[in-house]
Amino acid sequence: MISCRSKKKTSRRDIIKAILFIIAASSVLANYYFFAEERTTFTTKLISEKDALIIPESSKNQTDVLSVEQKIDENRNENNALIIPDRKNETDILVLVMGELGALEKWYNILKSIDATFSFIYASFDAQISQEQNAIYMENATFPFQVIFIPGTTWTQGRNILAEEAIRLEKKRGKEFSHWLFMDDDVVPLCYEECKTFYGDGSCWQNVFNFISSSKVPDNASTIYPQMDTTKDRYDGMKALSTPDALFAAFKREYVPYMLPYPNLREGYSQWMSQAALFCVMRTCLKSSVVNIPYIHLHNSLSRPYERGLILDQMKQIVKDNYVTDEFGFETCLSYTIHDIQQNLDSTELVPVEESDKFSTLIPSPELTKCAPMKKRFETWKESVLSVEQKIDENRNENNALIIPESNRNN
């Protein structure tokens, strides 16, 4: 009997111990899962805040941290791009476009969507904007903006008129821009698939401005341009050359005096020849300093009638008329052949965007002493532009109406 009672008491004690063990084990297990979930959430939060990543909704409650990180890596946003406008605060671009009045609204809408610091001058050659339409643009513009009318002008003349307006605007605002960006009105940028990796999710135009405003542009580059051809010699990276197409040209302001104004052409000359003459200047003084915008090329949607062709005799005559004078004495180009004025000459080797810090070593040092006559030519031209502006200001009447002296109307 004693032995039976003893066994019964032992059995009850064991049961109580077992119950207590189960309760304790359940508590530990609950805490384990609680902290495991918190650890996963905390890890995901750190990754999100540090790398600015887009986390898929389906991954947020998963406890497999490696699986979450893998999905995150596949969904990085533009903050992880290699090309960012990290020099935006020091980049102030003057956008200069010449074209038909009908294209103004398109350009206005393009630019108002761009996140960059810029001003805009549009030159229409076919029709003049009405006062009412101009007032609407000015009232709604979120950036400095003006429209001018340049009837009866050639491509070269129109570019130079835009350059004159740039000089006047810089004087008015009391400081120079960082870039003068010339474009034709029918320019369309097209981005390669790689743009999403290198630039992020912005528009193709935003990518263009982001590159101009980025430290990926070497300090010793003189000009920035997108690639022109989509099939031949595609640039999977960055390289520089001397002779780009002219429908897009972002000149660094410090080098403008060595390249502008465009040379004047004799009547009937090919409009290509103003750029061909500039090729000689580039190859002589700023060789291989025109840097391409990686993974973006340009297309021009219109083909207007004008005088075309590379004509060597015309190029040499243009050089004599514009660069070889008693005052300037720039004679380098007169020995050129037709092969010396082709596009895409003096190319550097191709450099991956990831190694862009090495790119500047491939661009030769500028030989600006050779182009000192060009700078003197620019300064003389600039003085004439500003003197005409002063005379115009002196001839405003009491109603602020503009009276342009007869002697200045054709200048």
Image (cartoon, grey):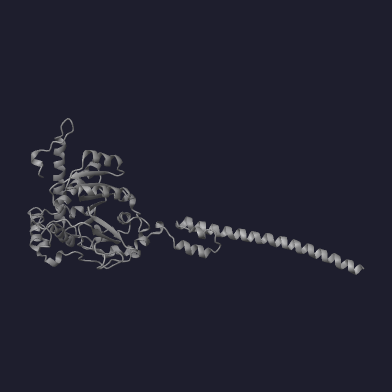
Residue 349: quarter of image = bottom left
Residue farthest along the top direction in this orientation: 398
Q: Position of residue 158 (x, y in %)?
A: 16, 50
Residue 406: quarter of image = top left
Note whether 339 is above or below 267 in the view shown: below
Front-most of residues 71 and 81: 71
Left or right for 172, reference 63: left
Quarter of the C terminus within the rendering: top left
Note whether 137 is above or below 3 in the view shown: above
Number of numbered labels in the structure image: 0
Note whether 207 is above or below 101 in the view shown: below
Q: Position of residue 380 (x, y in %)?
A: 13, 48
Residue shown at 13% from the left, 38% from the top: 391
Residue shown at 18% from the left, 62% from the top: 283
Residue shown at 53% from the left, 63% from the top: 65
Left or right for 297, reference 312: right
Quarter of the N terminus within the rendering: bottom right
Front-most of residues 259 and 133: 133
Q: Position of residue 238 (x, y in %)?
A: 29, 64
Q: Position of residue 227 (x, y in %)?
A: 25, 62
